[in-house]
Image (spheres, rainbow, N blue to C red):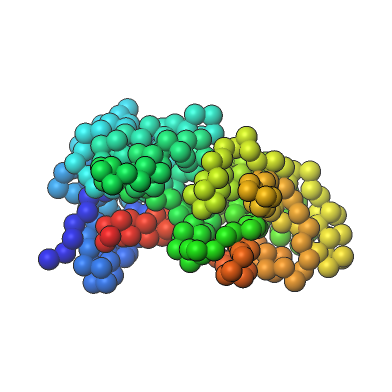
Amino acid sequence: MSITRRLILSGLGNVGRNFLGILISQADLIRREYDLEFVLVGAADSGGVISNASGLDVAALLAAKQARRSVATLPGGRPGAGAVELARTLDADILLEATPVNLKDGQPGLDTARTALERGMAAVLANKGPLALAYLELAALSDLSADERADAPPRPALRFSACVGGAMPTINIGWRDLAGARIERVEAVLNGTTQGILRMMEAGASYADALAEMQRRGLAETDPSLDVEGWDAANKIVILANAVLLRPSTLADVDVQGIAKLSAADLQAAAARGERIVLLCLAERTMSDYRLSVRPTALPASHPLARMGGDEMGVVYYTDIAGRLSVTTLERDPVPTAAAMLRDAIDIATH
């Protein structure tokens, strides 16, 4: 008999809509390979919510969003209601949080994730804001808690691999594949929008045209200043520092510089020197601590992150005993980020 797991999806923008699509497209594979069935029992967007304990019609939800309508306009929808209400009242196993990033107070994603975890519901985040602002609080409510007492009650799972490089297993590598190694340095390109903009400008496109193209593809944040000013990348290095390096960190710990002051001439001059400028996330070990930064950096053309194209992101881990480990991902649209949410949900449901 298949395992059934009930889901709530908060946020139906580019990532959330694509998650609905892969729930449909991958349903047979998930059932066959994992003996698992996901049932969506609640969904929330900026216009309201809809819920059904027996399961929602995912195709109808997707059609509504493609027609630019709120799910609250469907039969049984509740205009004006929010995802926190669903997390507080619905009988569900996993909350999936994909609302836009809000670096002022993390809302509404922070309250939604907090409510789910406090109820014992697992949470999968594609929204970086709650983790960048309140990682330690959310971790303490979850299976990532530092409370190792033998009598500590079991806590719900918290996963967020979609937050740090889309489908690239940035966090999973640090957790699993580098177990037992000391990480000396992390270099990463974790913002696909700025990577695409820089490579298009390098080829002669204007900054405005390059940004418009990334918005057209649905890769830019709802507020694109988060991308170009470096804050989206800073969110990601904060999450990585907390989760993988075990360094309690906030955005205030990151030296942040964006790409707005770069010109096509700067990029072309670097190329003429045999270098390539990327928006580099850096965590560098100094004694017993790490220094964190995000800034445009010229790398030699032979560097793994300099060899990437405009649709790629990558991370390089330098360690004491596991050598150097590099991984890249090619993502032209939000589907791989939605796929990372599915990956986390499968991991939770099957373990």
- The reply to whether residue 274 is in sight is yes
User: Quick check: 306 left or right of 272?
Assistant: left
- Residue 158 lies, in percent from the top left, at 37, 47
Residue at x 63%, y 48% (from the top left corner): 288
Q: Nearer the viewer, residue 27 or 329?
A: 329
- Residue 342 lies, in percent from the top left, at 36, 58
Q: Residue furthest front?
A: 150
- Residue 278 lies, in percent from the top left, at 71, 56
Task: Decide: is 60 above or below 102.
Answer: below
Q: Residue furthest left?
A: 1
Residue at x 19%, y 41% (from the top left corner): 91
Residue at x 22%, y 44% (from the top left corner): 92
**Which quadrant of the figure contains the N terminus?**
bottom left
**Which quadrant of the figure contains the C terminus?**
bottom left
Image quadrant assignment for residue 153: top left
User: Quick check: 203 left or right of 151?
Assistant: right
- Residue 134 lies, in percent from the top left, at 47, 35
User: Quick check: 79 left or right of 11?
Assistant: left
Image quadrant assignment for residue 341: bottom left
Task: Decide: is 15 above or below 47.
Answer: below
Q: How many marks?
A: 0
Residue at x 67%, y 46% (from the top left corner): 291
- The reply to whether residue 95 is in sight is no
Image quadrant assignment for residue 305: bottom right
Q: Nearer the viewer, residue 250 or 213?
A: 250
Task: Decide: is 323 above or below 207.
Answer: below
